[in-house]
Image (cartoon, rainbow, N blue to C red):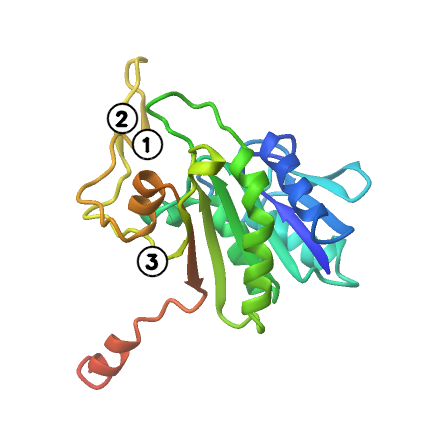
Amino acid sequence: MRILITNDDGVDAPGIAVMREIAAELSDDIWVVAPDGNQSGAAHRFTFGRELGLEEREHQVYAVVGGSPADCVVAGMTHICKDLRPDLVLSGVNNGQNMGDIINCSGTVAGAREGALHGALGIGISQGVNYELGHEVNWTNARTYSVRVIRQLLAEVKTRGDAYFNVNLPYCAPEDVSGVRVVPFQRFSRSPMAYYPSDNAGKFFIAIPETPMPIDPENDFGLMMHGNAITVTPLMLQHTHHDLVARLDGAVGL
């Protein structure tokens, strides 16, 4: 099995080293193509109309200079590994959880999605952080449980089809992990993104100042944050709202 690894924290981020450890338990044919710097929040952005650079950092490890995670997967699939395209795209391990509507801006999830668009099984993996206690990340649960989850997904998902996966690991001690739950992602009551003032006059940030409420205890956010569960969310490449297609076809027209 050929594995392509990417992320949105950058090729030198600790999480990509963790992902290489995980991948090494699954295969000896591992390729890394990741941004040269932090691309968190890049979502599924492509860099059109601007040249990108490709640097070989070490054997089978490449940095895309100025590129997004989606750019990296395209370079990996259609150039670096074009003669034998990867079967599995692993995106992460991200520093911090990617759950709820936040997946829409996640470069980690986008890396998995772009992998699936190219015919691989795409899996995004994020290690949760308790931001109330600080931003320090403990990779123990990612190292302990990720291989098991990936193997089970590989065994159960026989055909690549329309699916890709978002996996989040809790920040509790390994012995306190309550299990694995396959669940929907949390749709918030409103977007978590908001204006956040800067200390510099006339400047501001786009940030997530607080978690929108209420939180469904049976969706990814509630189960990982409050139930210490590893959450697995199957996602679809096909975004069409089929119920509305059926209901509005013929009702909307000239």
* Residues under numbered marks 1 and 2 in contact, where contact means CB atoms less than 8 Å apart: yes
Q: Amino acid at mark 1?
A: Ile
User: Along the horizontal axis of the image, is 36 left or right of 83?
Assistant: left
Element type where label 2 sits in the image = strand
Q: Which residue is mark 3?
A: 184
Circle nearer the N terminus (3, 1): 3
- Residue 251 horizontal side relative to residue 103, left or right: left
Callout 3 environment at 10 Å: few (<14), some (14 to 19), or many (20+)? some
Give the number of the disc on residue 196: 2
Camera-side residue of 222 and 15: 222
Q: Residues within 10 Å of mark 1 (few under 14, many from 20)?
A: few
Residue at coordinates 78% horizontally, 51% vertically from top-left? 28
Question: Mark number for residue 206?
Answer: 1
Residue at screen point 70% across, 44% down: 32
Which residue type carries mark 3?
Answer: Pro
Total numbered labels placed on residues in the image? 3
